Amino acid sequence: MTIALFGKKMNDRCRNGMLWLIEKSLSAGNEVYLYAGLSYLLDSMPEKSRQALVIYGSRKELPSEGNVLFLSAGGDGTFLEAVSFLGNYTCHIAGINFGRLGFLTTARFEPDSCNEWIGDLFSGNYKIEKRSLLRISCPFLPEGMYPYALNEISVHRTEASMLNVEVSIDGKALPAYWSDGLLISTPTGSTAYSLSAGGPVVMPESHVLLLTPIAPHNLNVRPLVLPNTSQCVLRVFSRSGKIAVSLDNRSFSVPEGTEMTVRLAEYTINYVCLHEEGFIKALQSKLMWGEDRRNNLKEEL
């Protein structure tokens, strides 16, 4: 199997975990590619390990598509960077949590644990979830910026004054949103920014998009669930004359009144899930879903 390791500069705890992951990948007989941004780790490895690694700096330097397990080591931010880095390169992608919450990550590295999940990854003992992305069409998109988002595409204010957000769905206009901004999210993104803004939790396999206002200035505005075939056209107005647009963790600005179109992307990512109950378990362990003393009464009796 071919393992491609990806990550950013790390603190000592994460650095030790990454060295462990490299050695485990090599000792299992895998061909291992290491992202050039992590090449500083080479000085901490045995000579034999250094010689066995292949250093890559772009997706074009990875082997043929389809037979690569891409491991993003870090937190959710690193995972989002990995998705942007890969683009439409076809592989299986898993997140190894060296960060904090790590909702998008498949497994968590624990320094004092045997981390049995590593065997499941190398043996292919996991399922693949097809996670959808969003694509934006905008005349002011910076050159070279990846126009896709796994979690959400958002428009938001750059100064104190509220925004007037005009939205049409498949050519049908909605009442204008007066708010600090607006989110268009995938089911994957339902547990990210949208959740913080009051949006619903959505199962990842649902074929929907979420429209969630950010701090709306009218009480009768609620999040809206749309079919994922919808085409959303936005025009945003502000006293400052400038609007911020974010695609996951990447941002740029546009003049007010700019027409932007958001729709489902033409491809998906192959997200690695180690357990059948992965999403529900993540809700319970990371968002304390259903945490209620009454659920444990049987154990106390």
Image (cartoon, rainbow, N blue to C red):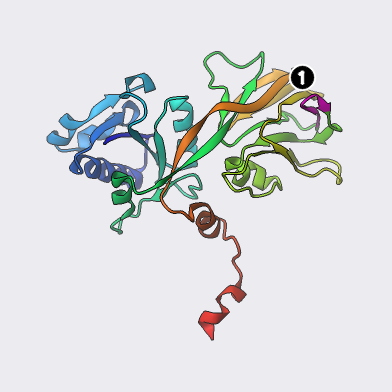
State which region is magenta: 163-172
State left or right for residue 200 relative to residue 58: right
Categorize mark 1 by other alpha carbons within 10 Å: few (<14), some (14-19), many (20+): some
Rendered residue at 54%/19% (across/down): 145
In the picture, measured across the screen, residue 9 lies left or right of residue 181, that is left
**Does residue 211 appear in this view?**
no
Q: Where 44 sits versus 237, above or below?
A: below
- Quarter of the image with the C terminus in it: bottom right
Residue 168 part of the magenta-drawn span: yes
Residue 219 in sight from this viewpoint: yes
Quarter of the image that includes the N terminus: top left
Amino acid type, mark 1: Glu
Residue that label 1 marks: 256
**x then y, percent, for residue 186:** 62, 38
Left or right, 217 with reference to 117: right
Q: Position of residue 182 (x, y in %)?
A: 73, 34
Q: Residue furthest bottom?
A: 301
- Residue shown at the point (59%, 66%) measured from the top left: 291
- State the image coordinates of residue 159 (x, y, percent, origin top left): 74, 29
Residue 207 lies in the magenta-colored region: no
Residue nearest the viewer, comparing 103 with 31: 31
